[in-house]
Image (cartoon, rainbow, N blue to C red):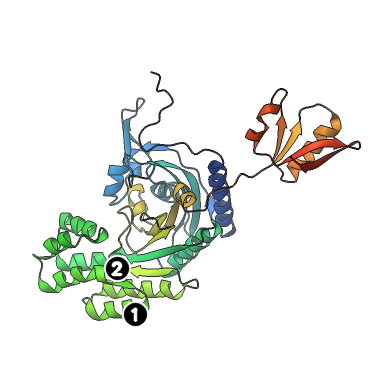
Amino acid sequence: MNHAWLLPEYVEDILPPYARQVEGLRRRLLELFDAWGYEPVCPPLIEYLDSLLTGAARDLDLKTFKVVDGLSGRMLGVRADITPQAARIDAHLLNRQGVARLCYAGPVLHARPAALTHSRELLQVGAELFGHAGVEADLEILGLLLAALRATGLADFRVSLGHVGLFQALSQAAGLTDDVRQELSAALQAKDRPSLEALAAGLPEVWSDAFRLLPELYGGADMLAQARCDLPALPGVSRALDELGVLLRSDAGNVLSVDLADLRGYGYHTGVVFAAYAGGQAQAIALGGRYDNAGAIFGRVRPATGFSLDLRRVSNSLPAVAPRGGILAPWGQDADLVQRIAELRAAGERVVVELPGQEAHRDESDCDRVLARERGEWRVSPLG
């Protein structure tokens, strides 16, 4: 039996009319980014592996497909995230001294799906801001993320804020090894209370209590005030809570909340992190935050913050797509007909020319109107 039409597991086509919806979302978001001053870049789908696995992005290593380059013999990776590529472009190619705002749209491939219902091929659209270390840059990126979510047409979404710097400050003060820190971070992210208890059990009481408390610290401004009282008074902890407070005060739509155990991201984040959810999905449709060390591997450390959305997940969170409709036009070389079709298309109409012998398949064209000659003129009327 011929199975040439089969695709690999967790890889799928996007069919009409959903492909049109996804492409419309991509265009809308790139136009929004342009209005905010973000310049588009188009990195390659495949790069040398060292460039793709920047900083401390250990989980990116697990997500990345790896192949040997037949020309150089070096290891290549199919990108699992475009953010490191944007950092390379900023650090090595643009070499700007001031702020650089970049955006992008393209597919990324994961070696493993994030969940059993998800594709391994994501359609990533994102924006990155390089060259500013202040919370003002995080405010801009968060504002752009909220604008992007609204531009997609999502009726119900929420954004969870966290801060990797707070966890790092506690980990450093507690003297945790890298392995314990990684395990503790994973336990917090998964809200795995038994693992958290086991990892915290061997720590001094002040640090054990602090890590155990983090999953309970979620909410708004009142929670931040409680965290200031209950967590150790470390400079890194105070700074993180201050920055989260600034971001919360910008919430005009009441969609932001803080979860101090939410450390979502790709492992390279260093400060504020964002995770957006919609449609009751357990997996985030957008991730972002500050990642100030990503450019180090390219020889130039620049502060950076940004986010990316997966258009597949956004599309899955939107209402079912209705056919666009269109105008069915007869085939012909009459000059008036050709001109009328061109005018309709220039006006934004979808015009499908019915080729000879296809009259029996009109319902497959998704047209709701027809172009026909009436009283010597080509007129559009309902298709009945």
Q: Secondary structure at mark 2?
A: loop
Badges 2 and 1: C-beta atoms under 8 Å apart?
no
The amino acid type, in three-letter code, at marker 1 is Asp
Q: Residue at x 28, y 48 (%)?
A: 59
Residue placed furthest toward the top: 1
Q: Residue at x 11, y 61 (%)?
A: 198
Which quarter of the figure has residue 72?
Answer: top left
From the top left corner, tell me how far across and down residue 335 is, in percent. 85, 30
Which quarter of the figure has residue 246?
Answer: bottom left
Q: Residue at x 79, y 27 (%)?
A: 332
Residue placed furthest toward the left: 202
CA separation in Å, label 2 and label 1:
13 Å
- Pointer 2 residue: 260
Q: Residue at x 55, y 45 (%)?
A: 23
From the top left corner, tell me how far across and down residue 63 is, in percent. 31, 43
Is residue 228 rendered to the left or right of residue 334?
A: left
Q: In which quadrant is the C terminus drawn? A: top right
Is residue 252 rendered to the left or right of residue 380?
A: left
Q: In the image shown, does 341 or 86 lie closer to the viewer?
A: 341
Numbered mark located on residue 165 in the image = none
- Pointer 1 residue: 222
Q: In which quadrant is the N terminus drawn? A: top left
Q: Please tell me whether residue 103 is drawn above or below residue 8 in the rendered image.
A: below
The amino acid type, in three-letter code, at marker 2 is Leu
Around disc 2, counting alpha carbons within 10 Å, would you say few (fewer than 14), some (14 to 19), or many (20 or more)? many
Is residue 247 rendered to the left or right of residue 151?
A: left
Q: Please tell me whether residue 3 is drawn above or below residue 120 in the rendered image.
A: above
